[in-house]
Image (cartoon, rainbow, N blue to C red):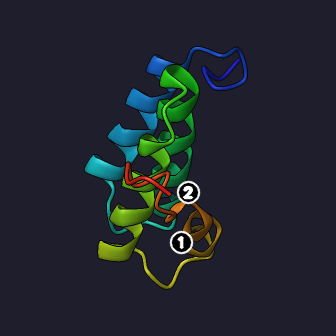
Amino acid sequence: MPPLAVKQWDEAERRYRQVVEQFPSTEAAPEALYWSGVAKYKASGNPVALGETAQRFKQSYTESAWAKKASVWATDRAAGRPA
């Protein structure tokens, strides 16, 4: 089973990040970036991980459907700023 499915958050985050780093121009990269952010958040419980992922989408893959999904994470709380 995939690491995300069995709650192996650190392993899932590492694998998804690896896809983004090794295959940045593929259609799989934006989805992998999204799920790497989810896995990092699940591992830590810290919403800043989601805010960081939303920021990365502002730099890359801005037109992807995954960027739109991650845009809800671009809040003050997720960015580590007081609400």
Q: Nearer the viewer, mark 1 or mark 2?
A: 1
Quadrant into which the N terminus falls: top right
Q: Is mark 1 in CB contact (under 8 Å) with mark 2?
A: no
Label 1 sits on a secondary structure element that is: helix
Reading the image, the residue beneath label 1 is 67
How many angstroms separate mark 1 from mark 2 (CA)?
9 Å
Query: Horizontally, is 69 left or right of 34 in the view?
Result: right
**Picture residue at 65% right of the left edge, 67% below the top:** 69
Taking depth in this image into account, of 41 and 65 the one nearest to the observer is 41
Q: Residue furthest bottom?
A: 63
**Picture residue at 58% right of the left edge, 27% below the top:** 42
Q: Amino acid at mark 1?
A: Ala
Q: Quadrant of residue 14?
A: top left
**Picture residue at 45% right of the left edge, 19% below the top:** 10
Residue 43: give x, y in percent of width and height.
52, 21
Q: Amino acid at mark 2?
A: Glu
Taking depth in this image into account, of 28 and 82 the one nearest to the observer is 82
Question: Is disc 2 surrounded by few (<14), some (14 to 19) or many (20+) residues within 10 Å?
Answer: some
Label located before the other in sequence (1 or 2): 2
The disc at residue 31 is 2
Q: Is residue 61 above or below residue 24?
A: below
Residue 62: give x, y in percent of width and height.
43, 80
**Picture residue at 59% right of the left edge, 67% below the top:** 66
